[in-house]
Image: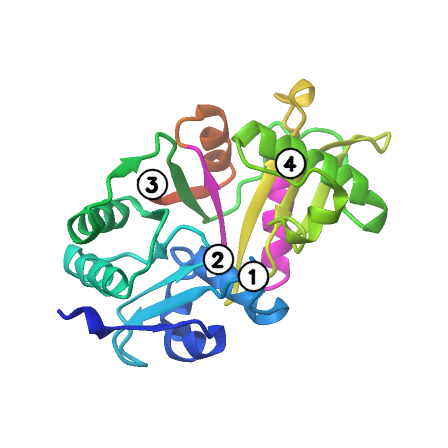
Amino acid sequence: MRPDDWHLTDDVDAFLARAGGFLRSRPDLHTMALTVTEALRAQGPRTYGAEAPLFGHLGEPGEVRAAFHRRTRGLLSPTVLTPEQADALAARLAGLGHVLPGVSAEQHTAAAFAEAWRRHTGATPALRAQRVRLYRLGTPIPPDPHPRGRARAAGERDHEHLVRWCRAFTADVGEDFPADDAGWPGTRFAAKRFIFWKTPDGTPVSMAGATAMVAGHVRVDPVYTPAHLRGRGYAGAVTAEVGRSARAAGAHTVVLFADPANPTSTALYQRLGYDPVAEFTVHDFT
């Protein structure tokens, strides 16, 4: 396999014209590529920063075997690769002078690319301790016990509440969040649809977000309950409602990511009917 078997572009429409069918063939495994490219297609190439994103595919249209995307200054995010495919991609990018901060992918792919990048550039890869596991909704199972209350779609009047809880969520998981409301449109939460779980007196006690439907698939993200309200079934109820709503809207694939080191959340999602698909890791390059 030659490095130039990988075809690169910064044009999202050109990329999707060639690799879109491949990405849609496994919307669960390709959930990040599908949602990122949809955001860029809908909102423009500078959605994630001033510099153009980068895309690539391996093979010809109709015979694409692998692909990758990279947001502005972000981690490389390839689909599942063989070691040979990973080596050819690393050689192609290194040969063109690209500098990568790291790779985020299915765990075996991430490890193969990290090693190939070390060989071709001399960079030292460092595996992040935190992993994430991808789950796909099979047969939905109602939460048991089911807490009292009801679901309600969040609207414009809930903006301040959503921002506050998204900020708290990112603090819990170690992500950055804008210091003021002006940065909200650039967050990964701004374009999502949110549902609250509310107690009988109307008090919001949990929330879950979902991406727009792309290629018949929806990703649930984030799920958040304030610490003092956890352990009462609210997260299960709102997660189940987001999945039900997505299926009712026509989604045939509903996925979410969870931390496999968190036994509470992983057990919850499996009780709701989510089945594990793959584990993803990140290797940083220094």
Say which amino acid is labelled 2: Thr
What's the distance in space between the residues labelled 2 and 4, CA to CA? 36 Å
Residue picked out by circle 2: 72
* Residue 203 quadrant: top right
Mark before the other along the chain sequence, 1 or 2: 1
Q: CA distance from mark 2 to mark 3?
A: 16 Å
Residue under numbered circle 3: 284
Q: Amino acid at mark 4?
A: Ala
Frontmost of labels 1 and 3 is 1
Q: Which residues are magenta?
A: 236-259
Provide the residue designation for mark 1: 50
Mark 2 or 3, nearer chain start: 2
Return the residue found at the far front: 97
Q: Residues within 10 Å of mark 3 (few under 14, many from 20)?
A: some
Given the current orientation, which residue lies at the most extreme top position? 228
Tag 4 residue: 237
Which one is nearer the viewer's eye here, 227 or 70?
70
Disc 3 marks a residue whose amino acid type is: Asp
- Tell me which label, 1 or 3, sits earlier in the chain: 1
Q: Nearer the viewer, mark 3 or mark 4?
A: 3
Residue 29, given in percent of the width and then of the height, sits at: 38, 55
Disc 1 from disc 3: Cα separation: 23 Å
Amino acid bearing label 1: Ala
Question: Can see residue 252?
Answer: no
Q: Looking at the rendering, in which quadrant would you find the C terminus?
A: top left
Sequence-wise first label, 4 or 1: 1
- Label 3 vs 4, first from the N-terminus: 4
